[in-house]
Amino acid sequence: MATTQPRTAVVQDWFLPGGGSERVAVELARLVPDATVYTSFFDRSAWGDAIDVRRVRTWPLQRLLGPTPHYRALLPLYPAWFSALDLRAHDLVISNSTAFAKAVRTRAGALHVGYIHTPMRYAWDLDRYLAGASMSAASRLAARALAPALRRWDVATAHRPDTLVASTQAVRARIQRAWGRDAEVIHPPVEVEEITLSTRDDGYLLVAARMVAYRRIDLVVEAATRLGRELVVVGSGPEDRRLRSIAGPSVRFVGRVDRPILLDLFERCHAYVVPGEEDFGIAPVEAMAAGKPVVAFRAGGALETVVDGVTGVFFDRPETDALVDAIERVDRLTVDPSALRAHAERFDVTVFRQRWRELLARLGVDPSLYAA
């Protein structure tokens, strides 16, 4: 790291509305305040207040398409663009990757730290990604045809970062299986202090997520419809139309909402629901910070954030019947809102920042680069 004018970079797959990965990238950009931020698409309306747009560099398709909601259709282009992204002028690069960002080119002697939310889902978990998705037969065929090449590319570029950091122990295990590398674990940041601890309970269930099939929002829509329970669904995505078509009158779709409205929904809900496997899941921890229990599928990041019978309840089968039973069990659960908030504080943004400072110090990075 011996250089008179160190140059730093943060790399993110994309900055589009509603994603936990984008929120992590914002925090990493704050950690390294002089970093240039490289990405594919940047939605200024969603993230322009969080990151100075003068720091952001996007790919050429941003000028042509803008922050298109059809960004997933461009899957074949991302590997080539990120692989060719030349950051050899930078001394410190932090990539925040759910699929592509880790592939950027850095020079020998520089430090590249890859924060990994999962090995590429389109390559390693395609069956679950496609199951129930509203995709044409041609799109499914193309995805399956691309998968072997994507797996090879994912393994090859997994060795570009010098150091890997996983978002959870579950992701660390996936990295070991897919890439044959180990990783340190630093959980994503949760802004606990901006959330008010609440004893108000307006009775509704809450889920907030991108509407993609693998999130299994269909399970909670079906469960709430069967029970006649009020459910508030926050978010947008390709499964929006299908989910509305199976929802009963007790289910309310509110689309994307501003942050103050989402926090209010956390503070007034009865319980938050995680119907599918999450890599980590910032939203359920935010619900616990508001003193609300969580109903979660027993897999992935929920195993590290939910304590069964204390901060929420698990269900074991990705089926509507199992989720209905779990909702009825959370109704009977006696919770201490203060204990739920104390549990959420284990994942507070201050912990995230401290863990990253400790990591960068161990790696010999100039402290002036991350004195955010």
Image: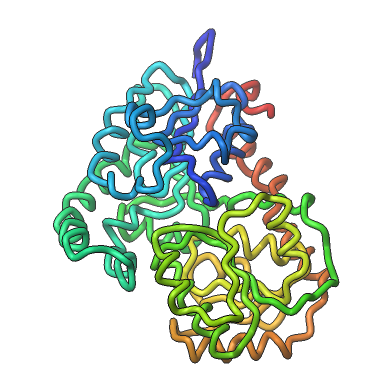
Name the residue at 32% across, 34% down. Answer: 82
Vertical placement of residue 217 versus 59, above or below: below
Colour scheme used in the picture? rainbow
The image position of residue 8, as x and y in percent, is 51, 23
Q: Quadrant of residue 346?
A: bottom right
Q: Name the residue rendered at 41%, 55% in the picture.
A: 118
Indicate the position of residue 57 as horizontal and vertical percent values.
44, 25
**Number of numbered tags placed on the structure image:** 0
View extreme (top): residue: 4
Q: Nearer the viewer, residue 103 or 242?
A: 242
Seen from the viewer's position, the closer of residues 137 and 144 is: 137
Query: Which residue shows up at 28% across the image and 33% down it?
Result: 81
| Residue 360 in view, yes or no | no
Q: Position of residue 7 (x, y in %)?
A: 50, 17
Task: Name the foreground residue: 135 vs 272.
Answer: 135
310 shown above or below 370: below
Quarter residue 64 falls in = top left
Q: Nearer the viewer, residue 240 or 294?
A: 240
The answer to which image quadrant residue 121 occupies is: bottom left
Residue at left offset 43%, top offset 75%: 245
Is 130 placed left or right of 11 in the picture? left
Q: Is residue 226 visible?
A: yes
Q: Where the C terminus falls, by quadrant? A: top right
Q: Is residue 258 above or below residue 125?
A: above
